[in-house]
Every structure is written in C-alpha cells, then in structure tokens.
C-alpha cells in the first residue's frame, strides 16, 4: 500500500515506505491522549497527542496542529503498549431494564425441589440478569441418575451471561419404569417427566419460554436429551457422552453441541451423532473417559448454543440481544486478558459463525486482530479446528459399526492422533486430547 508514513529522525520529518501491520485496533475510546513524547523504533522523538488508533495506524496531532499518521510498528514497544491500553475496546453500554418482581423463587439461587403435581419434581435456577416482561430461554438437564443442585455448577455462570434459565430434573434416570423394562420404556418415562416439568413452568412461571428450550444431560441422560429434542419443540440439545437412541429420529432443526471424553466408549456414537446435524452442530472432544467433563465444557456448550440461536433470531429478540451484547462485550474484553486463547476462539466464533454486526462486530474484530499477534492463540484455534476434522474423518465413521465399544482402538485412528499430538503438544488441553485419542476406549 502506498500510504505515507512519517518517520521522525533527529527532529526532522522524513517520508518512509509503508509496512502493513497485521494488528487491527478500532478506537472505541473517543478521548485522545494527553500530549506526550513519542519515540520511534530508531530513537527519534516527537511531542503530540494521539487522536485515535485504527487499522494498525495512529493519528498524532502536534501543538501546532500538524496531523501525522503512521503505522504502530514505527513506534517503540512501550508506546505501542500505551496506545493499546488507552484505545482498547470499551464494553457496549447496557440498556436500562428492570428485574421481574413477584416471582415465587429468588434470582441467582438454586430453588428447592419443585413439585410438578404429577409425581415428579425439578430444581430451578433463575439468573439475576432476567428482564421484566420477557420470557427467557431454558436449558433443561436430565441425568442417568437422580438430579441434584450440583448439576447447576456447569451452567450458572453462562446462565447469568446469557440470561438463560436452567432446570434440572430430579427424577429422570436410567431406571426402568415398572410397566416397561425396555430401553424404549426408559426414554418414554424420562420424556414424560420432562413434559411434566415444562408444563408446570408454562403454567406457573411466565418468565420461562418453554418453546425456547435446549435439552441437556449426560450418558443415558444425554441420550434422553436427544430423544426429548426429537419429540418436543426445542432449540436443540447439549448432550454429553451420549448417542441418539434408535427409537428417536434425528431432529430436522435445532442446534447441537455434543460433548464426549477422548477415550469414552461412546466416542464414536457421539461423533456420529454430531455429524448428522452438519453445520448446526459441533463435536467437542475433551479430556477423560465416560464423564461429562469439567465445568468449563458445559459453559462452552451453553454459550455456543445460545450465541448461535440469538444471532440467528436477532430481529425477533432485539432487546434481549442488546442486553446480552452489553454483558458479552465486557466478558470478552476481560477474557482477552485472563485467557487470550479462549478469547481468540470466541471472537472468531462470533464473527464467523454468528455474523455479529455493529459495535459487537467492532469489538470482536479489534480483539481478534490484537490477539492474532500471538502465534500461540492462532495455534490454539487451529488445534480446535483439527480436532473437529479428526472427529468427522476418524471417529464418526465408526459410529454405525462400533457403537458403544469398550477397549476399542484402530491403527488409523491412532496414527492420525499421534501426528496431531506431536504437532499440538504445546497447546493447552488439546495436546493431551490427541494423546488420549490414541488409547483404547475405557468405561470410566
């Protein structure tokens, strides 16, 4: 590009050729800096105010009114850091709203077990970010064993961020009903229990939108989540270490975040299930065997589902989206300092998968381009993408043949996982995942 850069050497302004800087920062802080001395990479100085930073260039104005625009990489590292801090993206201003009043259950706390009136019960979590007069989406968990308040640990933080309500069934489980000792009987029983909870919410909790529900669960409860999504109106599902029951037809609509342990005996079925939904799904392989993983996996899945949903329906839920983006922008800026690799992934997800616009798009683009300076962040995103490709190519094809299979391994899978383990050995979490994928499946 032929733009003019100013290089100040020995007090004289000299024209220099442009060097494109891959750092892209949108100046969302409108205030200019105080007048200060700026130092170039060759040691020359100039006294001026910085008016803005945009597209990798800084605009300076001297006290005589001379405006100078130059690439950030022409300044010292200290000056670049100062500018990045001063003009760092600011969070979106939150619109005013009121919390709902007169609810039977407190905000921000897990309720006592709520009786549906049909012999079943459920726990409920209402986030403090609920808005009066609106009906929020729901995440509803069914487990392979009895539900407990501890199940909320993997959902509460994102429930607050997204403004989503969370419900946990107390009674759904892998236990056979008295009148039908078959797998089909278990799924029908759990589906009935789920419907009882949703009907109770619809009648008694106007803040819950039971037509905007994601089903979740682990193992048999995850299979129930698939079953519920096929039988009830829903937005999709967040199943862990699960499979699509043979008696359930894969839903034609919805979003699916399918989680599974790297050496879980259901890993092939989970991969194959996710593949059935194409671009509307992701198979998130994580460390370990037959477990629902660490809490951050649940948080990741819940946020992935909600962001995909709310941006697809942005016109229908414009006010909800505005409140969410105010919280999301603040969260994303904070995350970029605390966990830059995760922040880089979420910026990419928001821009590429959710197609964010407006201020949120500017913030995501600014942060992503800034984080892209660190090759470790780029490698982290690459490792995630490679894991998705690995699941599709090497795990999913076994879904129909191997099914739930313990102590199972395959030379091609091992070879492919070994190559990726060597390539991404230094990438947090993912290097270990590729190592675990080389091992035979286990039952725990």
Image: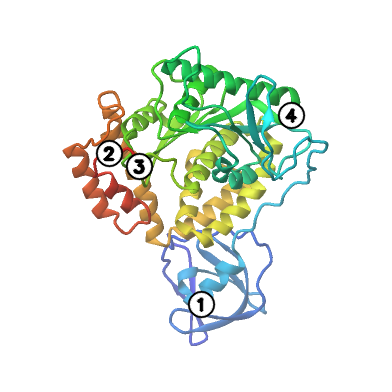
Residue of label 1: 78
The kind of secondary structure element at disc 4 is loop
Comparing marks 4 and 2, which lies closer to the viewer?
A: 2
Tell me which numbered mark, 1 or 2, is placed earlier along the sequence: 1
Q: Residue at x 63, y 46 (%)?
A: 161
Pick the residue in front: 349 or 255.
255
Instruction: Tell me the distance, in whole angstroms, between the alpha carbons under discs 2 and 3.
Output: 8 Å
Residue of label 4: 205
Q: Quadrant of residue 104?
A: top right
Instruction: Tell me the distance, in whole angstroms, between the alpha carbons under discs 1 and 2.
Output: 51 Å
Residue of label 3: 289
Comparing marks 3 and 1, which lies closer to the viewer?
A: 3
Instruction: Tell me the distance, in whole angstroms, between the alpha carbons under discs 3 and 1.
Output: 47 Å
Disc 4 + disc 2, Cβ < 8 Å:
no
- Left or right of residue 368: residue 417: left
Tell me which numbered mark, 4 or 1, is placed earlier along the sequence: 1
- Left or right of residue 375: residue 303: right
Pick the residue in front: 85 or 31.
85
Tell me which numbered mark, 4 or 3, is placed earlier along the sequence: 4
The kind of secondary structure element at disc 1 is helix
Disc 3 + disc 1, Cβ < 8 Å:
no
| Whether residue 61 is situated above or below residue 234 in the rendered picture | below
Q: Quadrant of the N terminus?
A: bottom left
**Crowding near pointer 4: few (<14 within 10 Å), some, many (20+)?**
some
Q: Quadrant of residue 37?
A: bottom right
- Where residue 125 sits: x, y (%)? 66, 39
């Amino acid at each position: 590009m032929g733009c003019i850069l100013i290089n100040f050497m020995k007090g004289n302004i000299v024209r220099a050729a442009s060097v494109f800087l891959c750092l892209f920062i949108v100046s969302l802080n409108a205030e200019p800096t105080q007048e200060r001395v700026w130092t170039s990479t060759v040691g020359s100085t100039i006294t001026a105010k910085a008016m803005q930073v945009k597209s990798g260039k800084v605009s300076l104005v001297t006290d005589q009114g001379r405006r100078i625009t130059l690439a950030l990489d022409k300044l010292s590292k200290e000056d670049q850091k100062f500018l990045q801090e001063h003009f760092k993206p600011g969070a979106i201003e939150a619109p005013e709203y009121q919390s709902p009043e007169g609810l039977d259950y407190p905000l921000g706390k897990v309720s006592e077990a709520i009786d549906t009136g049909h012999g079943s019960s459920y726990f409920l979590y209402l986030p403090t970010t609920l808005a009066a007069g609106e009906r929020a989406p729901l995440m509803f968990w069914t487990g392979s064993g009895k539900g407990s308040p501890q199940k909320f640990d993997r959902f509460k933080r994102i429930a607050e961020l997204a403004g989503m309500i969370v419900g946990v069934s107390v009674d759904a489980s892998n236990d056979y009903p008295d009148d039908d000792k078959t797998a089909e009987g278990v799924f029908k029983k759990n589906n009935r229990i789920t419907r009882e909870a949703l009907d109770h919410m619809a009648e008694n909790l106007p803040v819950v939108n039971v037509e905007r529900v994601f089903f979740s669960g682990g193992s048999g409860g995850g299979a129930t989540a698939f079953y519920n999504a096929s039988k009830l109106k829903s937005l999709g599902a967040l199943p862990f270490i699960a499979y699509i029951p043979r008696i359930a037809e894969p839903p034609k609509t919805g979003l699916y975040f399918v989680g599974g342990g790297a050496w879980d005996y259901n890993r092939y079925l989970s991969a194959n299930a996710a593949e059935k939904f194409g671009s509307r799904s992701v198979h998130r392989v994580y460390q370990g065997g037959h477990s629902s993983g660490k809490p951050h996996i649940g948080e990741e899945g819940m946020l992935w589902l909600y962001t995909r949903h709310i941006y697809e329906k942005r016109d229908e839920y414009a006010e909800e989206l505005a409140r969410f983006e105010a919280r999301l922008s603040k969260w994303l800026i904070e995350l970029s300092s605390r966990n830059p690799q995760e922040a880089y992934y979420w910026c990419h997800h928001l821009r590429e998968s959710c197609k964010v616009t407006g201020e949120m798009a500017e913030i995501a683009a600014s942060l992503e381009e800034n984080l892209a300076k660190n090759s470790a962040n780029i490698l982290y995103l690459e490792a995630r993408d490679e894991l998705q490709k690995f699941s599709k190519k090497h795990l999913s094809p076994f879904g129909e043949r191997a099914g739930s299979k313990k102590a199972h391994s395959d030379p091609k899978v091992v070879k492919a996982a070994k190559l990726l383990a060597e390539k991404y050995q230094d990438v947090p979490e993912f290097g270990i995942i590729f190592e675990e994928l080389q091992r035979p499946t286990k039952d725990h």
